[in-house]
Image: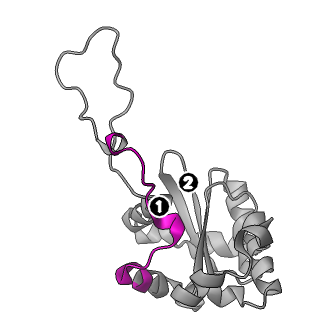
């Protein structure tokens, strides 16, 4: 399935130098591993041509994904968080992400304005983009304000990159927690 979806990375790898994968419910990282295998079978070095952002709500799955991606030297950010509510409880960087300088590669790509097709916001109804202000003052008895929107992001990637930047440094990279898995 990954070979059908990604193939050899084609135009994205030639144009930008690498592709970005976002996995909002990564489990043990099986789809990311399959994507790496499909790139490898196509003759592309996935360690240089692919970066993954993996998110899962279950800490056990986060640990499994981190170990698998680390052992295969796949550059990735593994986020312990909720992809639906954009809550982040922990962020783990694989050794490949750190050793190969992916933080700067990703930043340079973002500054250059290069966007993956997955990063382009959907072109839909303009009325759907309107933000309705929350009700202030008296509320009808049959109206309930469930949640006030905090921010609007164009993509899932933007949402979690903002959350990672807002996370304190001691929480982002806990060496003791990561080394305990090995």
Q: Position of residue 135 (x, y in %)?
A: 23, 26
Q: Which element carries disc 2, helix, strand or loop? A: strand
Q: Could you classify mark 1 by the number of other residues whose Cα lies within 10 Å: few (under 14), some (14-19), or many (20 or more)?
A: many
Judging by the rendered image, the residue that carries numbered circle 2 is 81
Give the residue drawn at x 42%, y 71%: 169
Vertical placement of residue 114 versus 88, above or below: below
Q: Is residue 19 visible?
A: yes
Front-lying residue, 147 or 118: 118
Q: Residue 137 occupies which quadrant of the picture?
A: top left
Horizontal side, residue 109 vs residue 150: left or right:
right
Q: Which label belongs to residue 160?
A: 1
Residue under the image location 24 percent in, 15 percent down = 139
Q: Is residue 29 visible from the viewing direction of this image?
A: no
Q: Which mark is residue 135?
A: none
Q: Is residue 49 above or below residue 83?
A: below
Instruction: Give the camera-side residue of 38 and 175.
Output: 38
Q: Which one is in front in this view, the residue at disc 2 or the one at disc 1? A: 1
Q: Which residues are magenta?
A: 108-127
Labelled pair 2, 1 in contact (Cβ < 8 Å): yes
Instruction: Residue at the far left: name it.
Output: 137
Instruction: Determine the residue positioned at 70% across, 85% down.
Output: 46
């Amino acid at each position: 399935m990954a070979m059908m979806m990604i193939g050899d990375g084609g135009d994205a790898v030639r144009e930008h130098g690498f592709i970005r994968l976002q996995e909002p419910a990564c489990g043990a990282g099986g789809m990311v591993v399959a994507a790496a295998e499909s790139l490898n079978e196509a003759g592309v070095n996935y360690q240089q041509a692919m970066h993954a952002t993996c998110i899962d709500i279950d800490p056990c799955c986060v640990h499994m994904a981190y170990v698998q991606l680390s052992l295969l030297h796949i550059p990735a950010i593994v986020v312990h968080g909720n992809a639906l509510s954009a809550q982040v409880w922990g962020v783990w960087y694989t050794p490949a992400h750190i050793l190969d300088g992916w933080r700067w590669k990703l930043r340079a790509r973002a500054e250059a304005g290069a966007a993956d097709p997955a990063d382009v916001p959907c072109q839909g109804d303009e009325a759907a983009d309107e933000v309705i202000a929350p009700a202030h003052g008296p509320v009808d008895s049959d109206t309930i304000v469930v949640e006030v929107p905090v921010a609007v992001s164009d993509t899932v990637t933007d949402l979690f990159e903002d959350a990672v930047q807002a996370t304190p440094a001691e929480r982002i990279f806990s060496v003791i927690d990561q080394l305990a898995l090995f």
